[in-house]
């Protein structure tokens, strides 16, 4: 892959007319009548949507977010004709370790804002520091518009390998969760000379299918619970994957024209995948950050392309065997995660595995940034 346009600084600036349009549409939403008891069993309750739609303008200080983002170095480049947006924050420490962080869906680069200072400028002078690179996955946020339909996980990983090379990093670590937990190992497979280690939160070692009696017998209570939750997910929550993997343009059209639809679609997962289980939207992540993410998707019109990249671009390759990366792999499993170490070890050279059974979920960088930063350091320090 090649750089087809050299990196140049980028500042997030959204015209006020775009924001006014968003809030006007939100306030004019035509909501349906509740189904049944108006609880979460059939989707986001109408009462919850009504509350969030009414407070969207007050809860999201987009000007304040833009000011915060303006203090973080951001850039645009072009790789193989695809616009790539990325954050690049160098530590003041000359011995900093280069670290690429990759997000997933329904996340974005915004997930990592609280994590950046913890990694780049740790309070403990003896703690490892990092130069942090956070690209927006093609089809997400400011890595728009999506050019072509062949942005598979391997190709996205190849673009990020090229980005790290363009930034001059000869040795680096790749980290990710959700979709990013697929991109990080792919970077390792593609670039074994320069990618020296892989760290993931959740998303590896996930069980598939029903466990047999022998598997149940050797599983811990936590692992049996993970089998149970995967089974419930496949039975009750798989519908969004079917839609986004087969009809991303259809769902993209609906969500690009309806703030309420986009909010409901994303909020359903922010609630279901964060900890505590099934917390209301004012929980650990909080409505402000949820609405900031939904606003970012709305303002960049990326609902359909984000769905395509993560769920449709790899077509039938889901679950297909991949070459085992040679790098050491570290993983942290928070309370809402579903990975099982022995299953992960069948695919990766796992040398570090942390179990957290009382906190944290799918959105680790937002829910437990201190613990995530600590685990990345512990993993890498153990390799020295």
Image (cartoon, helix red, strand yellow):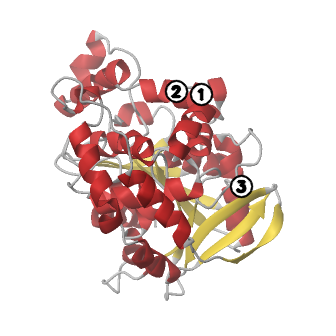
Q: Depth check: 271 or 164 in front?
A: 271
Q: For the residue labelled by badge 3, is the local secondary structure a helix, a strand or a loop? A: helix
Q: For the residue labelled by badge 1, is the local secondary structure a helix, a strand or a loop? A: loop
Label 3 Cα crowd, 10 Å radius (few <14 / some 14-19 / many 20+): many
Q: Could one spot residue 99 in this view of the protein?
A: no
Q: Depth check: 89 or 313 in front?
A: 313
Residue 137 in the image: above or below residue 5: above
Q: Tell me the quarter of the image containing the N terminus.
A: bottom right
Label 2 Cα crowd, 10 Å radius (few <14 / some 14-19 / many 20+): some
Give how far across and how far down residue 50 sits, in percent: 26, 47
Question: Which numbered mark, 2 or 3, is in the foreground of this view?
Answer: 2
Q: For the residue labelled by badge 2, is the local secondary structure a helix, a strand or a loop? A: helix
Q: CA distance from mark 2 to mark 3?
A: 27 Å
Question: Which numbered mark, 3 or 1, is in the foreground of this view?
Answer: 1
Q: Are marks 3 and 1 in contact (CB under 8 Å)?
A: no
Q: Quadrant of residue 244?
A: top right
At horizontal 64% and vertical 76% (from top left) the residue drawn is 10
Label 1 Cα crowd, 10 Å radius (few <14 / some 14-19 / many 20+): some
Q: Are marks 2 and 1 in contact (CB under 8 Å)?
A: yes
At horizontal 40% and vertical 67% (from top left) the residue drawn is 381
Earlier sequence position, callout 3 versus callout 1: 3
Give how far across and how far down residue 47 sits, in percent: 21, 42
Q: Depth check: 224 or 46 in front?
A: 46
Give how far across and how far down residue 371 sits, in percent: 28, 62
Q: Which residue is mark 3?
A: 159
Q: Does 372 sit left or right of 306 as displayed? A: left
Numbered disc total: 3
At horizontal 51% and vertical 34% (from top left) the residue drawn is 347
Q: Are marks 2 and 3 in contact (CB under 8 Å)?
A: no
Question: Can you tell which mark lies on residue 247?
Answer: 1
Q: Does 101 sit left or right of 37 as displayed? A: right
Q: Which residue is mark 2?
A: 243
């Amino acid at each position: 892959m090649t750089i087809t346009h050299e990196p140049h600084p980028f500042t997030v600036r959204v015209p006020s007319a775009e924001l006014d349009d968003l809030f006007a549409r939100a306030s004019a939403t035509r909501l349906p009548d509740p189904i049944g008891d108006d609880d979460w069993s059939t989707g986001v309750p109408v009462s919850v949507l009504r509350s969030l739609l009414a407070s969207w303008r007050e809860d999201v200080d987009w000007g304040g977010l833009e000011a915060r983002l303006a203090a973080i170095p951001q850039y645009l480049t072009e790789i193989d004709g695809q616009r790539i947006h990325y954050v690049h924050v160098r530590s003041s420490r000359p011995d900093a370790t280069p670290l690429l962080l990759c997000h997933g869906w329904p996340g974005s680069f915004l997930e990592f804002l609280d994590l950046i200072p913890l990694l780049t400028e740790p309070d403990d002078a003896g703690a490892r520091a990092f130069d942090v690179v956070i690209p927006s996955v093609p089809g997400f946020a400011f890595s728009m518009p999506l050019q072509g339909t062949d942005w598979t996980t391997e190709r996205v990983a190849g673009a990020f390998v090229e980005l790290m090379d363009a930034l001059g990093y000869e040795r680096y670590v790749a980290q990710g969760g959700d979709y990013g937990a697929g991109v990080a190992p792919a970077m390792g497979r593609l670039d074994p000379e320069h990618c020296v280690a892989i760290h993931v939160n959740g998303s590896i070692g996930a069980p598939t299918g029903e466990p047999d009696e022998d598997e149940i017998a050797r599983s811990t209570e936590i692992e049996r619970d993970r089998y149970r939750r995967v089974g419930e997910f496949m039975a009750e929550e798989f519908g969004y994957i079917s839609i986004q993997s087969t009809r991303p343009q259809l769902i993209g059209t609906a969500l690009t024209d309806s703030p309420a639809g986009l909010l409901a679609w994303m909020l359903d997962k922010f609630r279901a995948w964060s900890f505590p289980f099934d917390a209301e939207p004012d929980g650990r992540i909080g409505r402000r950050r949820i609405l900031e993410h939904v606003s970012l998707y709305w303002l960049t019109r990326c609902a359909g392309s984000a769905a395509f990249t993560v769920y449709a671009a790899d077509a039938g390759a889901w679950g297909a065997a991949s070459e085992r990366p040679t790098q050491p792999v570290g993983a942290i499993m928070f309370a809402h995660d579903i990975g099982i170490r022995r299953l992960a070890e069948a695919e990766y050279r796992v040398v570090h595995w942390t179990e957290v059974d009382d906190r944290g979920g799918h959105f680790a960088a937002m829910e437990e940034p201190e613990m995530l930063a600590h685990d990345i350091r512990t993993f890498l320090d153990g390799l020295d």
